Amino acid sequence: MTKMNMISSLNSALRCQLEKDPNIVIFGEDIGYFGGVFRVTDGLQKDFGAHRVFDAPLAEGGIAAIAMGMSLNGLRPVAEIQFADYIFPAYDQIVNEIAKIRHRSGGEFSAPLTIRTPSGGGIKGGHHHSQSPESQFTHTPGLKVVYCSNPYNAKGLLTSAIESNDPVSFFEPKRCYREPFYGDPHDVPTWNDHPDGEVPEEYYSIPLEQARIVREGEACTVIAWGTMVHVSEQAIKNSGIDCELIDLQTLLPWDRDTVVNSIKKTGRCVIVHEAPKTSGFGAEMSASIQERCFYHLESPIRRVTGWDTPFPHTTEWDYMPSPERIAEAIKKTQEE
Amino acid sequence: MTDRKTLITSPYTLGAPPSRPGETTDFGGKWKEQPEDLGRPDPAKCSAQDTVSHASGLIRVLNDKGEAKGEWNPKLKSETLIEGLEFMMRLRIFDDRMIKMQRTGKLSFYMRSFGEEAVAIAQTMALQEQDWIFPSYRQPGAQFVRGRSMVSMICHCIGNTEDNVKGRQMPVHYTWKEGRFISISSPVGTQFSQAVGVAMASAYKGDDEVCISWLGDGTSAQGDYHYALNFASTFKPPVILNVVNNQWAISTHRNLATGGRTFAERGLAYDIPSFRVDGNDFLALYSVTKWARDRAGAGLGPTHIEVYTYRAGPHSSSDDPSVYRPADEFASWPGGDPIERLKDHLINKGDWDDKKNAALEKKIDAEVMTAYKEACKFGDLASGPYPPASTIFTEVYETVPWHIQEQREELGK
């Protein structure tokens, strides 16, 4: 075990894959010689060659299409979209092409590729360096959608994403790249002090489609992904209520059994995400949960989310779900 | 090159077709460009700069007398030419049969390659069998060259139990992995940039493979066209990128697709050797494609080709071009009919005659009819049977996930 932050652990996952499988190629904007704007691919070009780790022209739609073409011809590309906010020129290729090729070709072709992208707020990034567009991909049959939250699961999940024979949209919460975030921008903890900052240097994987129970509890089930896992953890501590915290990890297909079993036990549920509330993935989960747990629910399912507005710059702490808002929602589930 | 016609309106200048219904289109008579006009550069030494005149001119091999002339003459054996003629005739007869079936409801929709038969057929014949084909919906003819059975193609079009894509795609959206023929996609142009990725993978693996892709003049306005050219220019993989300029994208004339000059010339700005070729001249198409294949196979990178032709029929079975263009335009197209031109050339050479041609036509007609009857044994869109409804739920992912399995059970089939 080594102490790693999420950047090092993602780098380690890519490194293990490049060593293991000659068909892995990695490309994206600024990811080659420079090593990426967040340094996730630092040193990979030097160690594995510019034919395997290279810079792409600034064209997200082209990057997705090139990745698809490569995957159709036997490679297993890992493409980086520099910020999730920039993924939309690639949307047609991802939604109509990459996700659909297996089905529409009668199973004759498939596109086993991974698109990594930093997402979420908390870095003073304003409108276009802060969004969390996962639900715009969970509405896409044929795609898997993964959202890591800490160095340990980032490496294990990215490994499984790359090894999946289905295409994967892999979201990385950039606020947690260098340290966990508990909702207080003035408190800067480190992954060094966090149990999930312990990461094996060697190869391992964490299965997709499985949620992780971060903390067991009896009074309320709190479900989150990405940065919100840590903010929810803090909220639970602050509330003093014995909550079960679930890190969803894979959003499509999501681990309904783990969620449903927890809510049958607790009878109460709060779903937390950074993305806007309307048509956010919390809406899908909430509908599914009531279908399965209606007679077990002691109070309405509550959602704590980003507002249905563009993501702001200076006021981002009022936009993102805070420990206070989450704790308030948890308390309400106990009172109703 | 015919001049670009515009309507001067305020505040915009709008590209316009040369004429509208009721008017007569003047394409200027026969081509002014002649087969001897343009030399054939050495593919091993050619730079984009060496193709400036090829990108603004028109590469021809068959002259107005039906003779093969000039440096681009590929000097193919007559057997090869007769084979090409047969593929083109087969495609036209097949298309006509499918349109008749469409009118009886046996398939929902159809798109003919009428007037453009030479494009996919001559170009695919100039490739090698391991090369990848990333077509638009107007290149199904490539499958004949690669040997796909007509029964299999018809089963797809009529969406029956033997449709290899299991009734999931509209007719003509063929997939055929065995022939390295990718699934045709309706969002136009997406295949063009993917083709560059395919070629980059071939280069990465060191395989002797080339990827060829086509899109239309209308589609060349899409970002995917420019992604493809820019990535091809940057990484120089073995790819052949064709713009089939057939003048019309449904009702959108090519004068609206670009305010520029020829489509071929755009490639020069990407530093890619670029050619404009008579798309109704089988020999010229073959020759230019072979040039591009030789160059790509030698590791020298991409070629950009404008295939200059005319969409002789409607865009699809849902289209009626008589409301937006003169009905007799094709009759005055200087490129003529690609099948007639190759036939006349073979007759000129003394290797073919009308009697042989009529016999071949009759043979193909019978084969198409036999294939049609054989395919209909497995059902058709009008009366079924269709692929089982369970195929809605399979192959979305490698394995069926729980939520899709539940939905399948909800449907109960």
Image (tube, coloured by chain):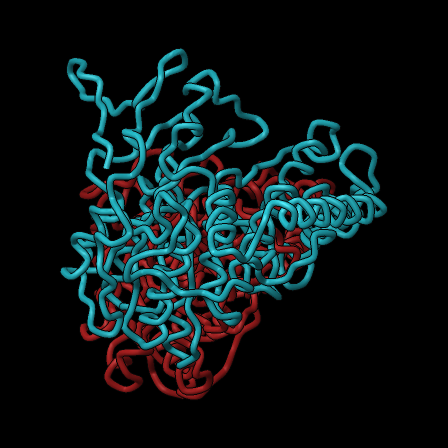
Chain colours: A red, B cyan
- In the rendered image, which quarter contains the N terminus of chain A? bottom left
Q: Viewer-proximal residue, B300 or A167?
A: B300
Residue drawn at x 41%, y 68% is B210
Image location of residue B346, percent across then percent down: 50, 53
Residue drawn at x 60%, y 53% is B86
- In the rendered image, which quarter contains the C terminus of chain A? top right
Residue drawn at x 32%, y 69% is B237
Residue drawn at x 70%, y 31% is B100
Residue B385 visible within the image? yes
Image location of residue A275, percent across then percent down: 40, 44
- Total numbered labels placed on residues in the image: 0
Residue A157 visible within the image? no
In the depicted structure, whether residue B202 falls above or below residue A138: below
In the depicted structure, whether residue B188 falls above or below residue B83: above
Image location of residue A144, percent across then percent down: 53, 58
The quarter holding residue A289 reads top right
In the depicted structure, whether residue B106 falls above or below residue B356: above
User: Which residue occupies the extreme front position in the image?
Assistant: B350
In the depicted structure, whether residue B327 falls above or below residue B91: above
Q: Viewer-proximal residue, A225 or B176?
A: B176
Image location of residue A247, percent across then percent down: 50, 60
Q: Viewer-proximal residue, A104 or B25?
A: B25
Relative to B309, A221 lies left or right: right
